[in-house]
Amino acid sequence: MKIDFKTAMHRLQSAEDVLILAHANPDGDTLGAAYALLLALQDLGKRAKVVCADGVPERYRFLYVEPQDDFEEKYIVSVDVADRALLGKAVEESYGDRVDLSIDHHGTNRLFAKESYVEPDAASACEVVYLLLLSMNVHITKDIADRLYTGVSTDTGCFCYSNVTPRTFRIAADLMERGADAAGINVKMFETKKPGFLQLEQMVLQGMELYENGRISVLTISRAMLDKTGCKDEEIDAIVALSRQIEGVVIGITCKEKADGSWKVSVRTHEGADASRLCALFGGGGHKRAAGCSFDCSRDEAVRALLSAAPSFLP
């Protein structure tokens, strides 16, 4: 059931012993929102903990907060999770049907929680959490500001994506005034690459395929590439953005092979093409400019299916 902003705020204010769920294959937004909310609830005298199926990747370790005393959760909140399946199998089995409140910014949210507050016009889940914390009169410390800024920055491509609004910049500015290390976070997230990552980036671009007169690009990241370069799954998200950076490309498709041999597909689009509608055809979802889906088949079969549908979404 959808609820309004004020109800979501009251739910958080009254909640006790809160379990916060981030999505699997975590990014800066889900982790930033989760740990900012954890710190805020602790500052309000509540007990809170974060669970993520895949743990916290190395590049996001600075967001991690050491857990306090363990406790039996009484209230469960998910952040930046549009579908219970995105929690990861183990977490979904344990908590998927027990989520009390979903805080999200995906218009494709499947309303799997008992109550959902979804703001699809927000550039990130951290924007939504920021607004909720302000309304709760939480003192946004530097530690909270760093985590919220990380989510805002990473989910907007360092403020380059079309999801950025004037409010996004105002929130970022306020977080900087509250102590967020914007420059340091931006360097860590966008300007620091390991040698293995540069090698992987080169391999992926060499294998790039173009279709529909250069308006659709397809990039492939195989397990063999990851093994050869020593890159981890959580390090490759930055490559996805390359798919739509080629002049003339409107729809960028990146196929990433998972450890079990299935394929995770990330779609990035420019104005006029809706990534979420394309991915929805294959059981996925997301935003107009960034969405994803999965395929339990070969890479070639997945690409053929995508290319049979993608041209109809070209402007």
Image (tube, rainbow, N blue to C red):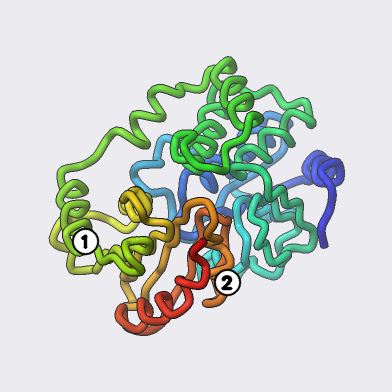
| Residue 127 x/y as whole percent | 64, 37
- Going by the numbered disc 2, the residue's amino acid type is Ala
| Residue 149 x/y as whole percent | 53, 31
Judging by the rendered image, the residue that carries numbered circle 2 is 280
Judging by the rendered image, the residue that carries numbered circle 1 is 226
> In the rendered view, does 143 fall on the left or right side of 45?
left
Q: Between marks 2 and 1, how big is the CA–CA gap?
A: 28 Å
Q: Residue furthest top?
A: 177
The picture quadrant where one finds residue 83 is bottom right
Between circles 2 and 1, the one closer to the viewer is: 2
Categorize mark 2 by other alpha carbons within 10 Å: few (<14), some (14-19), many (20+).
some
Categorize mark 1 by other alpha carbons within 10 Å: few (<14), some (14-19), many (20+).
some
Q: Which badge, 2 or 1, is on the more N-terminal residue? A: 1
- Looking at the picture, does residue 15 appear above or below residue 150? below
Q: Residue at x 52, y 60 (%)?
A: 273
Q: Nearer the viewer, residue 190 or 209?
A: 209
Query: Tag 2, which secondary structure?
Result: helix
The picture quadrant where one finds residue 98 is bottom right
- Going by the numbered disc 1, the residue's amino acid type is Leu
Q: Residue at x 23, y 54 (%)?
A: 231
In which quadrant is the N terminus drawn? bottom right
- Looking at the picture, does residue 207 appear above or below residue 101? below
> In the rendered view, does 77 fall on the left or right side of 289?
right
Q: Nearer the viewer, residue 175 or 271?
A: 271
Q: Residue at x 32, y 61 (%)?
A: 214
| Residue 207 x/y as whole percent | 19, 64
- Looking at the picture, does residue 248 appear above or below residue 183? below
User: Mark 2 near mark 1, Cβ–Cβ under 8 Å?
Assistant: no
Mark number, residue 200: none
Residue 237 seen in the figure: no
Q: Nearer the viewer, residue 49 or 20?
A: 20
| Residue 29 x/y as whole percent | 53, 44
